[in-house]
């Protein structure tokens, strides 16, 4: 089973970094991690970093031509178009991939989202990828108010 995600332009492969992270994006990144750990092949394409993948897929090209970037993200499972213009729910992903994805309790949802926000940009799955080199590994001066420090920047 393979799921392909054609994402809008984001700073790194997950888009889960920076000072204000969309909670839906954090949940989606955590859901994709769970799918990958259950054996599903997950492939994400970022419009800002991999435009050729968008140009090579006829269905993606057509959706972008007719709808524009509001069609993103575009989700396929085993080549079948499943969704466009929104991030699917965990239940939808489980149904489409026939994978048992654990549904967290209400209390643990915020903890899972927080973990995804803290680790997903520089997670072990991205070590060695172009994103890890370009997005996460460099230390640069960060200025917050009047205070400047040097720390790893996700974006």
Image (tube, grey):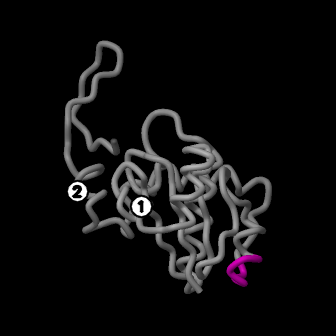
Q: Position of residue 8 (x, y in %)?
A: 50, 49
Q: Position of residue 123 (x, y in %)?
A: 39, 62
Q: Answer above or below: position of 143 versus 43.
A: above
Query: Which of the 4 image quarters holds residue 69?
Result: top right
Number of the label disc, if any, that sits on residue 41: none
Residue at image location 30% in from the left, 13% down from the top: 146
What is the secondary structure assignment of the residue under circle 2?
Answer: helix
Q: Quadrant of the C terminus?
A: top left
Q: Position of residue 78 (x, y in %)?
A: 60, 82
What is the secondary structure assignment of the residue under circle 1?
Answer: helix
Answer with mark 2 or mark 1, whichever residue precedes in sequence.
Answer: 1
Residue at image location 54% in from the left, 61% down from the top: 60
Number of the label disc, if any, that sits on residue 133: 2
Q: Is residue 64 left or right of residue 23?
A: left
Residue 65 sits inside the magenta stretch: no
Q: Which residue is mark 1?
A: 55
* Range of residues picked out in magenta: 95-100
């Amino acid at each position: 089973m393979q799921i392909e995600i054609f994402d809008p332009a984001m700073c790194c492969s997950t888009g889960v970094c920076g000072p204000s992270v969309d909670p839906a994006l954090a949940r989606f990144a955590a859901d994709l991690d769970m799918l990958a750990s259950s054996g599903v092949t997950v492939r994400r394409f970022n419009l800002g970093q991999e435009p050729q993948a968008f140009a090579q897929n006829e269905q993606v090209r057509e959706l972008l031509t007719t709808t524009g970037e509001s069609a993103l993200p575009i989700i396929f499972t085993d080549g079948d178009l499943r969704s466009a213009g929104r991030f699917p729910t965990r239940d939808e992903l489980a149904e489409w991939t026939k994978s048992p994805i654990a549904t967290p309790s209400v209390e643990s949802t915020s903890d899972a989202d927080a973990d995804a926000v803290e680790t997903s940009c520089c997670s072990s799955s991205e070590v060695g990828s172009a994103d890890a080199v370009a997005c996460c590994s460099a230390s640069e001066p960060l200025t917050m108010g009047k205070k400047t420090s040097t720390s790893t920047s996700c974006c």
